[in-house]
Image (cartoon, grey):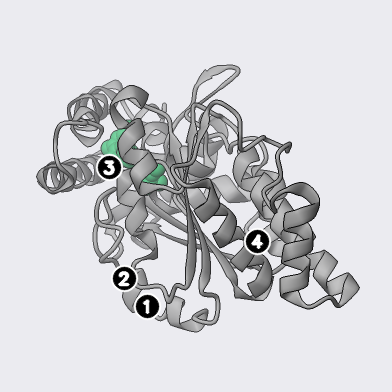
């Protein structure tokens, strides 16, 4: 398992991380929930075969569309992605441009008649790739019935198709994203609900859907994202302990200090899920030890803390 002391893993306050993880052990899996972004968080920006794709990228490059569509979509991405990751623009300055980008991208999909039946093939041919270790993560969370909320400004239909074809639509999984509305002939005629872009994940329907209320006893949260906008995903959840894990994949020098102040753990240029997995594995191991020994929670935590220095552990 990945070593939290690896040079590409940064923690502003390792003791705070330790304290949060110890609280996770005390609370047990019945009080835990995971909230994760999708593009470039559960999926990887690159792998051994080169750059990978986001949901929209996969649509942008699909052969179902004429080249004029691809050119237009690419032009939008080239213009707006630079704004999204501009380290010198404040988030509030970026928001109008993100609304423009998502609106134009959606209008383009409608103009070029996206069809529902294309989606399985688009995903099959895409380079939307889950980070190595996601299989273990999804299976572990499902086995322990820990809810996994995938909160994405991507395309919900593509995310669902990716889980179906490259993993499994587990029963503890909930996807909140931009879902396409198809008419009776399976032709796109709009999008469901409010537009979700990368910087408005705090004010969305999920916060009014009652989802967080349904699981309000799960006030220990692991939040994972690749964008500063992802930090808002847990807004509205009843939260006592939250561990914020950030994947920094782009403009590392410009963003590292800001990420370190915003996320509890920052993982730089790692195409795998091994750091979150090492934490979840050790929390589950400590919890299962507690169950097996029937030992009072604080004893287990202390025992773990003394035996290997920390629940996080040195080697992983
Ligand atoms: N190639 C395109 N990428 C796009 C477009 N609109 C958004 N995006 C990217 O998607 C992610 C959001 O997904 P999330 O799961 O990370 O929330 C965002 O970071 C954008 O870079 C588009 O039209 N084309
Ligand atoms: Mg993302």
Ligand 1 location (quadrant): top left
Q: Which residue is mark 3?
A: 109
Q: CA distance from mark 3 to mark 4?
A: 29 Å
**Residue 201, x across and y down, in percent:** 30, 58
Residue 170 is marked as 4
Within 8 Å: ligand 1 and the Cβ of disc 2?
no
Q: Nearer the viewer, residue 203 or 71?
A: 203
Within 8 Å: ligand 1 and the Cβ of disc 3?
no
Q: Nearer the viewer, residue 294 or 233?
A: 294
7 relative to 173, above or below: above
Tag 3 secondary structure: helix
26 relative to 113, above or below: below
Q: Which residue is mark 1?
A: 209
Dot 3 or dot 1, earlier in sequence: 3
Q: Nearer the viewer, mark 3 or mark 1?
A: 1
145 relative to 124, above or below: below
Give the quadrant of residue 297.
Answer: bottom right
For disc 2, the neighbor class at 10 Å (few under 14, some 14 to 19, many from 20) is some
Q: CA distance from mark 3 to mark 1?
A: 27 Å
Dot 1 or dot 4, earlier in sequence: 4
Q: Residue at x 60, y 46 (%)?
A: 276
Contact check, label 3 and label 2, Cβ < 8 Å: no
Q: Nearer the viewer, mark 3 or mark 4?
A: 4
Query: Considering the image in quadrants, where does the C terminus appear?
Result: top right
Q: Which residue is mark 2?
A: 205
Q: CA distance from mark 3 to mark 2?
A: 23 Å
Dot 2 or dot 4, earlier in sequence: 4
Contact check, label 2 and label 1, Cβ < 8 Å: yes
Q: Nearer the viewer, mark 3 or mark 2?
A: 2
Query: Considering the image in quadrants, where does the N terminus appear?
Result: top right
């Amino acid at each position: 398992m990945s070593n939290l002391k690896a040079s590409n893993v940064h923690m502003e306050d390792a003791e705070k991380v330790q304290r949060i993880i110890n609280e996770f052990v005390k609370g047990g899996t019945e009080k835990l929930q995971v909230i994760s972004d999708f593009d470039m968080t559960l999926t990887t920006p690159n792998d051994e075969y080169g750059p990978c794709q986001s949901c929209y990228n996969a649509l942008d490059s699909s052969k179902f569309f004429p080249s004029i569509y691809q050119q237009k979509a690419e032009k939008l991405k080239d213009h707006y992605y630079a704004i999204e990751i501009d380290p010198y623009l404040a988030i509030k300055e970026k928001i109008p441009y993100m609304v423009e980008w998502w609106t134009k991208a959606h209008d383009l999909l409608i103009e070029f008649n996206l069809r529902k039946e294309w989606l399985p093939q688009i995903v099959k041919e895409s380079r939307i790739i889950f980070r190595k270790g996601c299989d273990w993560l999804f299976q572990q969370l499902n086995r322990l019935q820990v809810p996994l909320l995938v909160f994405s400004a991507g395309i919900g239909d593509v995310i669902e198709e990716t889980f179906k074809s490259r993993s499994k639509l587990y029963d503890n999984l909930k996807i909140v994203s931009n879902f396409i509305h198809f008419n009776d002939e399976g032709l796109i005629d709009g999008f469901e609900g409010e537009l979700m872009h990368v910087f408005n994940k705090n004010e969305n329907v999920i916060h009014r859907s009652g989802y967080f209320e349904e699981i309000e006893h799960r006030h220990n949260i692991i939040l994972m994202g690749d964008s500063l906008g992802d930090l808002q995903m847990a807004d509205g959840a009843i939260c006592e302990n939250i561990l914020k894990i950030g994947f920094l994949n782009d403009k590392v020098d410009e963003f590292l200090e800001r990420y370190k102040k915003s996320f509890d753990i920052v993982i730089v240029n790692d195409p795998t899920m091994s750091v979150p997995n090492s934490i979840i594995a050790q929390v589950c191991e400590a919890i299962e030890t507690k169950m097996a020994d029937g030992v009072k929670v604080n004893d287990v935590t202390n025992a773990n803390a003394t035996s290997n220095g920390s629940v996080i552990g040195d080697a992983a």
